[in-house]
Amino acid sequence: MGLSIGIDIGGTFTDVIGMDTETRRIMSAKVSSSPQDFAEGFWKAVEKIVALFGASRSEITRMVHGTTVATNAIIQRKGAKIGILTTDGFRGTLIIGRSARPEMYNNFFDIPTPTFICPLNRIIGIKERISAKGDVVTRLDDTEVIRAVKYLVEREGVQAIAVCYLFSYINPTHEQRTRQLIQEQYPNVRISLSSVVNPRFREYERTVITAFDAYVGSTMEMYLRGLEGGLHKHQIETALQVVQSRGGVTSAEICIQKPVVTLLSGPAAGVAGGVFFGNLCGRENIITLDMGGTSNDVALIRDGKPFLTIESQLGNYPLRQAMISVDTIGAGGGSIAYMDPVGGLKVGPQSAGADPGPACYGRGGKDPTVTDASVILGYLNPDYFANGELKLYPELAREAIEKFVAAHLNTGVAEAAAAIHKIINNKMADQLRVVSVYKGYDPREFSLVAFGGAGPVMCGRLIKLLGMKEAIVPIIPGVLSAFGLLVANIEHEEVATLIVRAEEIDPEYITRVFRELENMCEGKRGEVGISSTELRIQRSAEIRYVGQSYELEVQFPERGVKITRDTINEVVKRFHDTHQRVYQHSLPERPVELVALRVVYWQEPEPRTRLNPIRDGLDRKAIPEGHKPAYFDEYSTFVKTPVYLRSNLTYGQILEGPTIVEQLDTTTVVYPGQKARVDEWKNLIITRA
């Protein structure tokens, strides 16, 4: 037997999924996370899934991991002590930022630049200069670099140094020489070069992401090296792979070299899993909804492919790297319900988190949450929550909602719980409109793929609010992000900055740059784990109108197609079409410029994840395990509701709402006026009755 394992660590639970690559049997589990040492939860998950399969650790052939260690280090401000070397005269780049004022009328707003990473006294200007064309204007002074580094290491005690010189993305020789000098003097100091981390123009954004790379580098290296050592200790021969922000998987070694590729990678695996099940059901136009304990992540997929964004943010800070376009709001099972100063009911974005968590967890939490409301409404089984890892206490949920909500609304506890659900559902409906209607897409033409611990509870309400055709609840919704790790492509990308007008560019120059990028990818291919026989290559360009501030990515013909003037004209036409679709207007008469070129090496994972269709039991009638009282707005009271076990459902069965379907990793609610059909993959397809 060969066993592929995906492990996704969240704040409350660590999700693990395993697939027998010979029989295609899939099993999953949840274990409690260990926030003080996430590696502890990782190994508990490995042991549990191996035991479920009755296998030995030596039979593990693939191990893929999703981690938020780098993101948490920034959010919690627990990164390394770093210094920054920059071109003389540009010491204030990180401090000044874009001079943006995010809250115009707030005199006490937080500065939207990550000054906590590195104060001004640890930013040193070096007399060197590269021109905008890549020519050396002022040569690097080795003595000055050594003096600056000595001050940072011996006087300031820095553990890592970020090097970000002006125009190094065109000519990186000064940064490369600086790295050599630091390594000769202080071999244990970690170094991040902007020409490696983010060889792109816009000085502030490049400085931020390079500083982030240095800030989280030591933490990520310690964590991933520890896991790799654990693989050897546990006699697991396979290499560790890690998911990136753009949704692809790479080696742990690449993540150690450039840890920023994992920032905001959390939602990426869930989107990959959602795309897999959308394609499995024959739906290429879907919206994924991943509702967990703290947040709700939404992504729109068109023609089977998620959109990538080049510009994102981590809090108020720019995070410039290619990543799946995901909209996130503070709407999860742990979102806290409270009364605002004028007596209105609000839900979120504040969350009870994992500790103490919702009141019903019995861990000391006092605030009412969405999960508490779900318990009161009768949707969640207190003895069958999160695979039995956590027992819920309805009396604590009732006490919290009564005290902080119902008493203020002068209503019953059930009505207050229903109001909490109504508010959170409308917030998520607005979020779905943001990724669809606001970008020119009609949500009624899309299917909603719902997963996460709370997504299947809410999805029926959401498709009704937006008039969507259906909701698809995959067979493993509560651990779909872990499953997404196994189906995500293995990828490596390289980028080069150009900034050249399309009508002025030489096709031979474009060809040469693409070849250089492909050579760089080829040098990393073996390290990433991409085989030469399965290799696929994607070429693209970032393009904008001259004078525009942001770019759109447009595909170039694949390698082997000769690039000519006609090729460039066709790519420019694609840009106009893409601009029309994204922004609802285009300016074909305006000149455009190519800002950057990108090459992505990729292949599908090996062994490929496949599911076997199950078409047995077509004539069997679904028999509920029992009935329970559940509250629905349509009746304004509790009604006797059938409860089914997901594991007992078979192909072709139809469940009329209201119905509750329980399984180890989540609960699905089919609301009045809806029905759920079991397809041949054992997914639940929820539509209007």
Image (tube, rainbow, N blue to C red):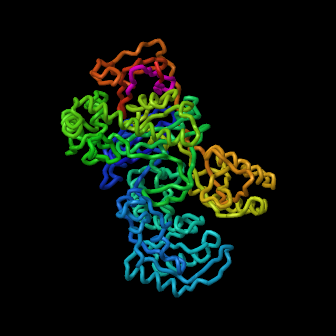
Task: For residue 373, say whether it is visible.
Answer: yes
* Residue drawn 43% across the image and 34% down it: 477
Residue 490 falls left or right of residue 64: right
Instruction: Tally the numbered discs.
Output: 0
In percent of width and height, residue 384 lies at 29, 31
Is residue 532 placed above or below 512 in the rendered structure? above
| Residue extent of the magenta highlight | 669-686
- Residue 291 placement: quadrant: top left
Is 671 displayed left or right of 587 in the figure? left
Spot the residue most to the bottom. 143
Q: Position of residue 279 (x, y in %)?
A: 57, 33
Q: Nearer the viewer, residue 375 or 489?
A: 375
**What is the x, y in percent for residue 266?**
45, 49
Residue 46 visible (yes or no): no
Q: Is residue 676 magenta?
A: yes
Question: Compared with residue 315, is residue 3 higher up or lower down, i.e. above or below?
Answer: above
Query: Viewed as shown, does residue 2 lie left or right of 408?
Result: right
Q: Residue at x 47, y 81 (%)?
A: 185
* Residue nearest the observer in this picture, 659 or 549: 549
Which of these two is toward me, 339 or 126? 339
Image quadrant where residue 518 sits: bottom right
Q: Position of residue 444 (x, y in %)?
A: 54, 30
Does 100 appear in magenta?
no
75 is higher (above) or lower (below) than 346: below
